[in-house]
Image (cartoon, rainbow, N blue to C red):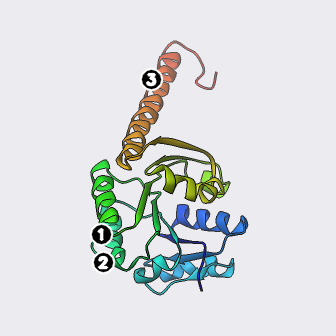
Amino acid sequence: MMTDVTVVGTGGMGAAIARNLINAGYSVAVWNRNRARLAPLEEAGAVPLEGPGEVFSSPVVFSVLADDRAAREVFLDSGVLSSAPVGAIHVNLATVSPALAEEAARAHADNGVGYVAAPMFGGVPVAQAGKLNIVTAGSAEYVDRIRPLLEAVSARLWPVGAMPRQANVVKVAGQVLIASAIQSMSEAVAIGERGGVDAET
């Protein structure tokens, strides 16, 4: 059965994204190494896949994998790209390094597969609410094709360039800003407390 989109990696974030796509009316296939994670999504209407070799049975693949190593194993080292149909697009929603994004973009291009980096800002509750902020980078043609799918799971899209690695650079920069803000707020509260001001105030 041809589905609109496959979601690869159905932990907390991936499962939330898959459910929101289903709720938006898309037909969704799902794959995860731990097949037990697929059962609730199958009950919600998703089509479970047997293995990673089937992920490109959809024209668009969303991946929400843990890190560089997982993304490399599933998409770069497995040979799955060589069996992808012409015109397929892989959208990497995970936080991976800019270096891996650059390598992945080359490997996908060599196999005639589109690649869009689309790292997310927001945790599981934000994903469940469909309110993610998603940074996108890649060919404008590919980004336009997947825009409706991304809009079904997000509050806003932030396009930052044509090179996929650019989105991952922005994600790293954003994480630095968030960490800095948390540290600054902590220090400001500590100053207040030392001066006799209630922390909640």
The one of 73 and 198 positioned closer to us in this rendering: 73
- Residue in the image at 47% along x and 65% along y: 89
Name the amino acid type tagged 2.
Gly
Q: Can you say which quadrant of the picture contains the C terminus?
A: top right
Task: Note whether residue 43 is visible.
Answer: yes
Task: Note whether residue 124 is visible.
Answer: no
Mark 3 or 2, closer to the camera: 2
Which residue in the protein does label 2 denote? 79
Name the amino acid type tagged 3.
Glu
Q: Tell me the CA gap for discs 2 and 1.
A: 7 Å
Q: Relative to 11, is 1 on the left or the right?
A: right
Dot 3 or dot 2, earlier in sequence: 2
Q: Tell me the CA gap for discs 3 and 2.
A: 49 Å
Which residue in the protein does label 1 denote? 76
Q: Secondary structure at mark 3?
A: helix
Residue 154 lies, with reference to residue 16, above or below; the image says above
Which residue in the protein does label 3 denote? 187
- Residue in the image at 47% along x and 22% along y: 190
Q: Relative to 70, is 157 on the left or the right?
A: right
- Residue in the image at 66% along x and 54% along y: 130
Q: Tell me the CA gap for discs 3 and 1.
A: 43 Å
In which quadrant of the rendered view does residue 4 lie?
Answer: bottom right
The one of 52 and 143 positioned closer to us in this rendering: 143
Q: In the image, residue 116 lies at what x, y percent?
A: 44, 56
Q: Secondary structure at mark 2?
A: loop
Name the amino acid type tagged 1.
Leu
Dot 3 or dot 1, earlier in sequence: 1
- Residue in the image at 45% along x and 25% along y: 184
Q: In the image, residue 195 lies at what x, y percent?
A: 51, 12
